Image: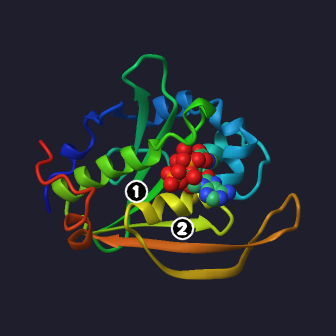
Amino acid sequence: MKARSKLARPLETERFILEPMGPIRFMIETREIRRDPEILAGLFQTSKPRSAWKWARTMSLPDNRTKFAFSITPKSGGRSIGFHKVKMRGYRSAFNSVAIGDREWWGKGVVLEVRAKLMNHFFSCSDVERFYGVVEARNTASIFNYRRLGYDHVGSWHRSNQNPQTGEVVDFLNFEIFKDKWMAGPWAEKNDDA
Ligand SMILES: CC(C)(COP(=O)(O)OP(=O)(O)OC[C@H]1O[C@@H](n2cnc3c(N)ncnc32)[C@H](O)[C@@H]1OP(=O)(O)O)[C@@H](O)C(=O)NCCC(=O)NCCS
């Protein structure tokens, strides 16, 4: 297995600096996001605000060994606009989750640019061979993002969860992509400078 310390280093995309956060920075930087009803609904299907304790527990804090959270800061200035997490779990697999708190940046391809960079980085610097994600069936933006990056929809969980606030029952869609498909596709960077 290749060293994982290489994974937790700052990265750059065309428009953003991505910085790996430790658990304390993650908690500080996500103070507003964890109280944002739309973000909470996207991540947890309920907009009920989370205490710091519950947020820490359910977000599984970054340890920069198998759990990573990269802060996303525009090169054009200003503060972090959100984060993208990558959690290594299962057999050579990595799980995505993302939240962009700053509405100015919604609809501007942030997730595509950032996720593509992180995938190239993890494919190049670790033994990860598969990325995957699980999306609530009405989270259209996330579904489009997975499809745009070439992920396959490999199954659905029907009526698998219930919103504790509204009682609504929701479905989830599973997406995955393997390294060989990614490397043959348009988003692959052949030379991650790792
Ligand atoms: C998920 C999130 C990061 C997406 O942000 P984003 O990438 O800026 O999303 P966009 O608005 O660009 O939408 C992505 C794509 O879906 C399309 N889309 C979004 N909503 C749509 C709708 N209702 N119908 C049709 N297309 C839609 C957009 O047009 C866009 O496609 P394009 O790139 O071809 O134009 C952001 O909404 C967020 O932080 N949500 C809360 C947390 C969350 O849900 N995280 C993911 C959990 S799995």
Tell me which residue sits at (54%, 67%) in the image: 134
Tell me where residue 166 appears, x and y as whole percent: 88, 61
Tell me where residue 12 appears, x and y as whole percent: 27, 34
Q: Is residue 9 visible?
A: yes
Q: Can residue 58 be seen in this view?
A: no
Q: Give amino acid for label 1.
A: Lys
Which label's residue is closer to the chain start, 2 or 1? 1
Look at mark 1 in the image and give the residue it sits on.
87
Mark number displayed over residue 29: none
Q: Which of 160 and 66 is in front in this view?
A: 160
Tell me which residue sits at (63%, 33%) in the image: 103
Tell me where residue 127 appears, x and y as whole percent: 20, 64
Tell me which residue sits at (55%, 58%) in the image: 142
Mark number displayed over residue 134: 2
Tell me where residue 70 appears, x and y as whole percent: 40, 39
Q: Nearer the viewer, residue 26 or 16?
A: 16
Tell me the element at label 2: strand
Q: Give amino acid for label 2.
A: Val
* The quarter of the displayed image where residue 84 is located: top left
Tell me the element at label 1: strand
Q: In this view, does 167 lie above or below 4?
A: below
- In this view, the residue farthest toward the right is 166
Would residue 80 be found to the left or right of residue 89 on screen? right
Say whether mark 2 is within 8 Å of ligand 1.
yes
Count the marks: how many? 2
Say whether mark 1 is within 8 Å of ligand 1.
no
Question: In what quadrant of the picture does the N terminus appear?
Answer: bottom left
Tell me which residue sits at (13%, 57%) in the image: 2
Labels 2, 1: front one: 2
Q: How is the image coloured?
A: rainbow
- In this view, the residue farthest toward the top is 77
